[in-house]
Image (cartoon, coloured by chain):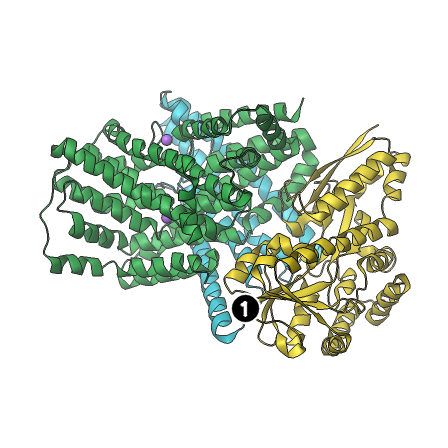
Amino acid sequence: QEVTLKVHHWGSPKSPQHVSMLVPWCEKVAKDSNNRIKCDVFPSMQLGGSPPQLYDQAKDGVVDVIFTIPGYTAGRFPLIEAFELPFMATTPEATSRAAWEFASTHAKDEFKETKLIAVNVNGPCNVYTVKQPVRTQADFKGLKLRAPNRQTSSMLAMLGATPVGMPLPGIPEGLSKGVIDGAIVPYEIAPSIKLDELTKFVAETDRTQPAMCATIFATAMNLAKYQSMPADLRAVIDRNSGLETSAMFGRTQGDADVPARKKIAEAGVKINVIPADELNRWRKATDALDDQWAAAITAKGQDGKALLQAARDLVKKHTK
Amino acid sequence: MTGVEQGAVIGVLMLALLALRVHIGIAMLAAGSIGYVWVSGLGPLLKYLQSAVYARYSVYDLSVVPLFLLMGQFATHGGLSRALFQAGNALIGHWRGGMAMAAISACAGFGAICGSSLATAATMGQVALPELRRQRYSPRLATAAIAAGGTLGILIPPSVPLVIYAILTEQNIAKLFMAAFVPGIIAAVGYMVVIGIIARVSPEQAPAGAPLPWSQRLRALVEVWPVVLIFLVVIGGIYGGIFTPTEAASIGALATAFVAWRSGGLKGRGFLECLYGTAAATGMIFLIMLGADILNVFLALTMLPKELAAWVTGLGIPPLGILATIILIYLVLGCIMDSLSMLLLTIPIFFPIIMGTDFWGLADDPKAIWFGILALMVVEIGLITPPVGMNVFIISSMARDVPMIETFKGIVPFLVSDLLRVLLIVFVPSVARVALKL
Amino acid sequence: MADVIVDEVHSHHHGPAGRLLIATCKAFAVGAGILLILMAAMSLASIVGRTFLGKPILGDYELVQVLCAVAVSMSLPYCQIARGHVIVDFFTTRMPASVNRVLDVAAGLLLAGLAFVVAWRLAIGMVDLKRTGDASMLIGFPTWVAYAPMVLSFVLLGLAALFIARDDLRKGVA
Ligand code: NA
Ligand code: NA
């Protein structure tokens, strides 16, 4: 018996997510199953719908496997959002392991309607600006910055900036029209949205410190499709999902930062590193966000404080 | 059955439904749904329909479409077309064929604040047609000039089909608008040259008017200030990097509403008529968009666009042969289909082919913009080609004493100008990029 | 293109049910237009905010998306009742009028059927989105709220198609 999986995601066919994560995952699955599991990978939302709908496409069986950003839909995956809190994530690989462990224990209910393949975070975010560099917290004041997710948006407000919401492809236009003064993304995405041409400064955080922000990603499979497969093929999927797959995805996305950073630097964008003591000030200024998150979780009937601690402990455990 | 064969079967089914008078959007939706069930099953289709409509209709960039349509309605009810025509006529009406040229220039001016061709043809027909007839222009030239001039509504930005192209191919709307500007001006000048030649060859068709004193000319020119202002704010704002297209369309809609209100155009049922007109045009476009979405997802599932692109680029046909074939397909389809449906139907198939072929060594983005302008030009020709030429239809409905065949005959020289312009852009792609480099 | 030639919608030829349907379609069209004007006003407010106060409206992109989806859906029924949806009539112009009538009735029924299917699926989708608490990213606008007017719009589109089909049928008989 042969199975063909329709794999759907929003990234371009040239994105690291497509080239270095999903296609290799498919090749690995094909190899482990002696070519009895095959994938058709559809990038760029070719099978319709919008990125926030990807998770439901896997849940409902419109497609078989999806790669998405849970934070696209606020309120849907509140627990896993803990890993998007400021200064939570360490290295992408370690944080992805922690996120997987958290998702498969504490946040199990959030993903119970699909067969979860992986949960990972990307590399640490940086602040790209057009007019002036960001060196201290005071520099945030009055800056209109595009935030990648809800937690980062709140964080920016606490630092004194004005968060602006717009889809990722809108960033180049937003920058050139002054709708935003800058954007917050990891290196890996920056060249694809022309930040190497459109911005002049990057504030990179001291990499020995936790990341100021990160975005969490999920790869999920339709449950019925998984259950309909024979036991040996299910075992192949099991072998290619979980802690190690999450770690691999996190590492891959983090590794993509390296060539992108080089490209940014070569384009003449000035990189300045925010030292640990300044970062500590930012962390204090945004501490309330942790409490807000915990309070929101507690309001939903779970122990927010304990869950926050659990997430922190897991990151610590997996970070060597 | 291979994906390409499945795609072909469903394509034929869709064309059959079209021929049997099914609405274009519904023909795509029905054929696409059958194809979807064939490839993926009924369950996935029903699940997909839960979210497809919202996904299709909630695209940020797409919001400029209803906004530009609303803006066009306000402009029509605000009497701006009359002011434009009178200004043009005051300036060049005394030339041979001058009044028809003034109608063309007014179409171009109206096109600069209106995103649709039929609206441009309709409003200019109401304003200019009676005047041209009174001046004893031949019915053939009078009707043809306005039908052709109406296409400037879309050739000159803002332009609804360009928005759709931008979204389908993930290109920048502002850049496409900018790129369309110079070719749009060339189109207007080309039509004026055609009228000038006709006026020379058969002067009885296009008499000259009496020159006006300069005081009157100035007064007529002053009357067009709202158009100039709105154009500067909207298109200037997009070009100048001040607004996103959605913001520019928002400001444009509010500004034209203000002008229409000041001129008394919103009195009585005027305001409601604007909203009804917007709803009718919006509804028509977005039903087609929904149908095209399902059909295109089905095509993606069959991998037809990918395989076809690989096959065509592997044939070793010279690039210009591929381009000529695509243009020919558009011209043939344009005889019976409308431009938006054509773009929605074909761009997902043709675009990968174009991007996989080398044209004049163009890089990806310039090539995508160049092909967008080219596609816009050729699909717009369909508005004035028989048997189904929507612009000719609307002008005919206003000049019932002129047989439609007369108008189609009068269109021929304008078509020649269109084809020459297409050739110009094919061979000199930089024409479509002049404004981008400024 | 992006244009449409519409028939004038005359209520007085029809019975009370027909008149109510036409009035509802018109009300939806007016509602769509007002939402578009609101959307434009909000964009303007956001521009003013970011230019003069340094603060755009938070979530303006998300609100435009929601308003656009609702306004566009609410335009669909009016377009149908005004016979504004485009058809290709080239192949059938030389056929007898009665054949064209039959085809038009069939096309109308097909449109009605598909509109009701879409409305049904949208309703299911709405319930599912409400259950899962789906909301927009920054301001947390609940997605299901936008679905409610869309469901009604597609039901109304189906009814409008049935109404026009019945009208065609009558003309065919007469
Ligand atoms: Na235009
Ligand atoms: Na035609």
* Amino acid type shown at disc 1: Ile
Residue at x 64%, y 64% (from the top left corner): A147
Residue at x 79%, y 64% (from the top left corner): A89
Q: Position of residue B217 (x, y in %)?
A: 15, 57
Instruction: Give the answer, above or below, for where C141 lies relative to A228.
Output: below
**What residue does disc 1 label?**
C57
Check the residue under mark 1 and report the chain it is in: C
In terms of depth relative to the viewer, which is nearer, C70 or B432?
Answer: B432
In terms of depth relative to the viewer, which is nearer, C124 or C163?
Answer: C124
Q: In the image, B391: left or right of B344?
A: left
In terms of depth relative to the viewer, which is nearer, B149 or C41?
Answer: B149
Q: Position of residue B280 (x, y in %)?
A: 41, 46
Q: Quadrant of the C terminus of chain A?
A: bottom right
In terms of depth relative to the viewer, which is nearer, B90 or B74?
Answer: B90
Q: Position of residue A260 (x, y in %)?
A: 69, 55
Q: Which chain is cyan?
A: C
Q: Colour of chain A?
A: yellow
Q: Which chain is green?
A: B
Is the residue marked by circle 1 packed among few (<14), some (14-19), or many (20+) residues within 10 Å?
A: some
